[in-house]
Image (cartoon, rainbow, N blue to C red):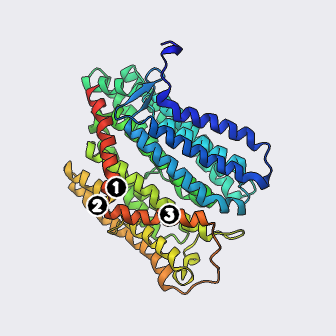
Amino acid sequence: MSWADLNLMPALPEIFLLTALSVILVLDLFLSDAKRGITYGLTLLTLLGCAVLTLTTWVPYPETTFSGMFVDDPVSDLAKIGLYIAVAVTLVYTRQYAANHGIFKGEYYTLTLFSLLGMMVMVSSSHFLTLYIGLELLSLALYALIALKRDSTPALEAAMKYFVLGALASGMLLYGMSMLYGATGSLFLVEVANDIASGQANSMLVVFGIVFVVAGLAFKLGAVPFHMWVPDVYHGSPTAITLMIGAAPKIAAMVFVWRILAQGLGAAVADWQMMLVVLAVLSMALGNITAIAQTNLKRMFAYSTVSHMGFLLVGILAGTEAGYTAALFYILVYVLMSLAGFGILLLLSRAGFDCETLDDLKGLNQKNSWYALLMLFTMFSMAGIPPLAGFYAKFAVLKAAVDVGLVWLAVVGVVFSLVGAFYYLRVVKCMYFDEPNDEPVPAARPEMKLVLSLNAVALLVLGVVPDSLLTLCVDAMKQSLSVVAGA
């Protein structure tokens, strides 16, 4: 293929992001700390530009470039829009916190954009090599973000743990990919899928490759028994960075898993389905049970994340279009819940004080009833209580399991969802029924209060009328999978 024949339109948002990122990186060198708001504004404009380009190039069928290694399809486009929104909301929520805690720097914004670029490559990869490159670009940026506050021992410790365990997970994933290459002779997802479906692949190598790939994916998702990094990294990182880790990357991780298991290894669903069943049950059980014992809200959210990844895996392991659609819907709703939950913690934090424990939320309703209501919406949604969006998300993934005959797994999901409701409702009890503490509610920036209000109210709206988002997920998944099936 000559350069004249190369169609770069499918990768236009990524090219724009990298160009804008380079400009911001150089420009920030000449800005004083007092003018750091310019970097913040340019970062948000970059996200807006990426969103416009993604919507402009959105087509109802896959387009490939770079010799078929990069694909632009409806699933990747929907995921990218979700990524832009999640990163933009994260930046709005963390601006005041970053200024109060000494991380309102150019590096914070450029590393965030580098991590976004990695996520965008992850969701648009159709080749094992580009999948791995996107994953490592995301991971390296997150390692640096966690350690950005260099005078914080917990942050440096969290960065080291994440780096060591992340390297181990990447090694396992790469080893599994090399086995799949040995079994099929290709690194293209579609060719791997065709070789496995036609019986031309070495079945023994495929099974061993799947074991290592699933283990690596479980590390990245934070599923049990590969979850040990999640509570320590969430707790040790500054709350702003914890939100950066716990929101947008989850969308990229879900599509990353879908690319590999559904598109590349869909014909071997019988080989990885039971592995995911075990991971899902363990994650729902340990995540919800361990969260009950937590008094630190960041650690509670960490174990909550583990349990939510278990529910996400229930949708994926169904191995059906409905299951994948439910998983995509679930992760988008989860990111909205995570943004709202951490947004409240960031709003209640100030210079010299981090809102991190249950005691910090005591009597919040008496100090600010609106903030308490927003947190109530978030907790009810995470618990899966109707009519919040979290209820419909859990219902969708459990229904997908029932549709493939895994009724017992759906029952397990319902049981552990009830267990999880305990610690979510405990937060509500602290806000509404405990005596308030002496900590004042700090003044928040107007844009943060507006976005946070819209964020939490969206959980209620999506719970009442989920069809708006669900239809987008259904159409995107149908259009992307139909081409794979016909390949």
Please identify the quarter of the rendering in which residue 76 is found: top left
Judge whether 263 appears above or below 437 on screen.
above
Mark 3–mark 1 distance (CA, rounded to whole Å): 26 Å
Q: Secondary structure at mark 1?
A: helix
Which numbered mark, 2 or 3, is in the foreground of this view?
3
Q: Earlier in the sequence, mark 2 or mark 1?
A: 1
Q: Earlier in the sequence, mark 3 or mark 1?
A: 1
The disc labelled 2 sits on which kind of residue? Val
The disc labelled 3 sits on which kind of residue? Ala
For label 3, the residue is: 340
Please identify the quarter of the rendering in which residue 17 is found: top right
Q: Which mark is residue 281?
A: 1
Q: Earlier in the sequence, mark 2 or mark 3?
A: 3
Q: Position of residue 280 (x, y in %)?
A: 35, 52
Judge whether 358 appears above or below 341 on screen.
below
Answer whether residue 252 is visible to the viewer in this image: no
The disc labelled 1 sits on which kind of residue? Val
**Residue at the image point whose x is 43% and y is 40% from the top:** 77
Q: Secondary structure at mark 2?
A: helix
Check whether the beta carbons of the residues at disc 2 and disc 1 lie within 8 A of each other.
yes
Q: Which mark is residue 412?
A: 2
Q: Is residue 185 left or right of residue 21?
A: left
